Amino acid sequence: MTTVRQRRVGKGAEAAEDQPSEEKNVKPDGKILSDHTGGKLWNILSITVGGTVAISLGLLTSVYVATLHENDLWFSNIKEVEREISFRTECGLYYSYYKQMIQAASIQQGLHGLVYDNKTESVRTINILERMNVYQEVFLSILYRILPIQQYLEPVYFYIYTLFGLQAVYVIALYVTSWLLSGTWLSGLLAACWYITNRVDTTRVEFTIPLRENWALPFFAVQIAAITYLLRTHLQPVQERWTLMAVFIATFLFSLTWQFNQFMMLIQALALFILDCFDMLPTAKVTWLCIIQISALLLVCVLQFFNSMILGSLLISFNASVLIARTIQKNLKKGGLLNRLGKLILHVLLVLCLTLLINKFIKKILNLESDEHIFKFLKAKFGFGATRDFDANLYLCEEAFGLLPLNTFSRLSDTLLFYVYVFVLFLMTVAAVIVAFQNLSGSNQVQVMEKMEECTIALKPDAAYNLIHSVLFGCLALSTMRMKYLWTSHMCVFASFGLCSTEVWKLTLRCIHLYTSQRTHVIKYSIPIITLLYISYKFWPGIMDELSELREFYDPDTVELMNWIKSNTPNTAVFAGSMQLLAGVKLCTGRTLTNHPHYEDKNLRERTKQIYQIYAKRSPEDVYRILRSFGTDYVILEDSICYERRHSRGCRLRDLLDIANGHILVLFPCLFFEFFGNVCRYEFPSLCSNFPLMEGRGSKTQWYPGIVRM
């Protein structure tokens, strides 16, 4: 018995059905030529209007976040030291290298200072270009020096305007991805509006400007857009080659600008692997994407002076294992359901085993331990045993590395984004499960129902990739709040695509037996327009109020501290303290540091733990010996750590140190000691309560409150 699907595949039937319509359309007056020309003109007009809207929205987003930044800090009116202090924690560290390159006598001298740096870590010379992803700062500083703009634009504005400009690229990439998926630029407009109205959960660029993710995520969005276009069917060879080149460039720039690139691309590689296993993507294109990921990462490795952390990344091991396993198992996609399931299980096990073996071998050869703190953190986070490890506990106690708060979903629901996303995600997931079962079963051996055929129509390769991408990054965001920005921005794309997709509405209406082509067309445009009107009505007044709210940067204590350091300490002085504050010390004063916030180095992590013993239950002699071993001249004690209230008991810095040192947490009578006008409250004896040099108060040496001179 012949199935309906098989009859439709037959060329004769298609020809018989199509021939009358062709005869009907062929007229002596040239109606076909007229229709073709009209359709082509309409496409050109649509692309022109859609492209103009995309660029306009991108530029408006850049102006919007730049205005928020100015209104929040009054950046144009505050002093240079206040501007630099506004770059908190690691942001200040990265910006300091841009400032260093700008102030260098020449570009060559600036590069030499980065390659042979002895001010970031005392008594050590390190290669900044190897250790950190700061090529963007190098490029910007060189560009600023060679362009004739020094008289019109200050270096700091050139820097922040570049980052705000990248937000335009980000929004345009999201817009284009949604447009490619749905076939209408109305979807891109909705995605961009959702991104802007959910700004609290989609970006933090206006207050963490130099953060690595603000450089990297626009390129990641461009890469996703290029992959979405690559996975479209019926591409010409020339189009495919140019798209692969675009994917490579975007992947390379993403990898170059963020140290966590390998983990994000590992999730992306896992998505491609899953789809390839279920025969939902062309194998050749998946292979090319794996090769592109490896090539881009190796090129970055070369530029970063063969950074061992890149060579030992799980991404390289995983992609290499996938390519090897595919070579070994050539008949993976042949056979019946049970046969293919068996092969698939063996294939997955083979890839996992090869990944672990290759990664273990590389790390053994390179003696690599730079990323061990990440795996310790993951092990403790997911309940595979408690740990006394200081680094793992430091991450576990930070809110940014905790679970995604529930109030995030209420904010996303206010704009209807979360509701639409869940609806589209459910529908597409059901379609993906049906299609995966169909592909594993084989169309020649199973009666293919009409419903399955509809699902196949709805789930094109580009839509399937974006579905799995969204699911995997959603899991990452739910487990680690800091990574939510990778998910929420793509959530805007995926939800808007579903709301404007002909295939999605066709499938939905067929399921409830209400399908007509006219009804589908009306719903496809009317619901997105209604959603846009609702968003505009509800959030436009709030955006206007936000733009009219004026605040000012105010941190007199830190400003006074930086000015005191510059005025009262030699240029060669070495400072110890918390990672976050020392980044600002380097940026504002140029003094040498003992430690800093860039935590992806085992020696630095151990050094930071030793420096933090000033807050632990250690004897003054031990603390003094530790500090002098790092060449410390001054120690900055912070009342925010002494009086810490942000974390609960057990997660305070001094508690983490006592746990790591093997001390038992027991309440002691509180000790008070007045230190240069500040009172530090401690439950354990520490540097604040019994450091011998505290008797210097009132002496001829003028020390700044909170600083101990060694």
Image (tube, rainbow, N blue to C red):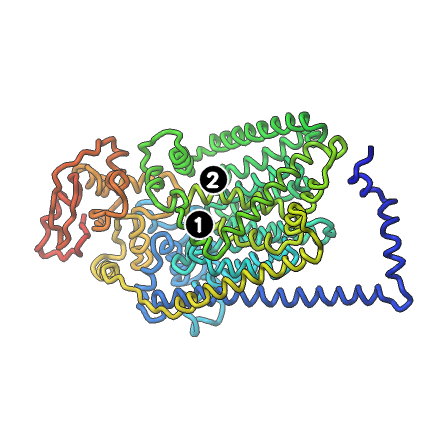
Residue nearest the observer in this picture, 612 or 181: 181
Q: Is residue 60 above or below residue 600?
A: below
What residue is rendered at 66% in x and 64% in y? Answer: 47
Q: Is residue 330 visible?
A: yes
* Nearest the eye: 515 or 433: 515
Dot 1 corresponds to which residue?
A: 409
Compared across the picture, whether 655 is left or right of 385 comes to: left
How many numbered badges does the structure rendering display?
2
Q: Position of residue 564 (x, y in %)?
A: 22, 60
Find residue 493 and report its horizontal and vertical position in percent: 56, 54
Q: Quadrant of residue 347?
A: top right
- Judged by depth in the image, the label closer to the viewer, 1 or 2, is 1
- Identify the element where label 2 is drawn: helix
Give residue 32's position: percent from left, percent from top.
84, 63
Kindly report the distance in space between the C-alpha atoms of the residues bearing marks 1 and 2.
39 Å
Circles 1 and 2 in contact, beta carbons < 8 Å: no
Residue topped by disc 2: 308
Callout 1, which amino acid?
Phe
Q: Is residue 157 visible?
A: no
Q: With 171 as the anchor, is 635 left or right in this view?
A: left
10 Å neighbourhood of mark 1: few (<14), some, or many (≥20)?
A: some
Instruction: Say which residue appears at 86% left-offset and 56% top-offset.
Output: 21
**In this orientation, which residue lies closer to the viewer: 620 or 423?**
423
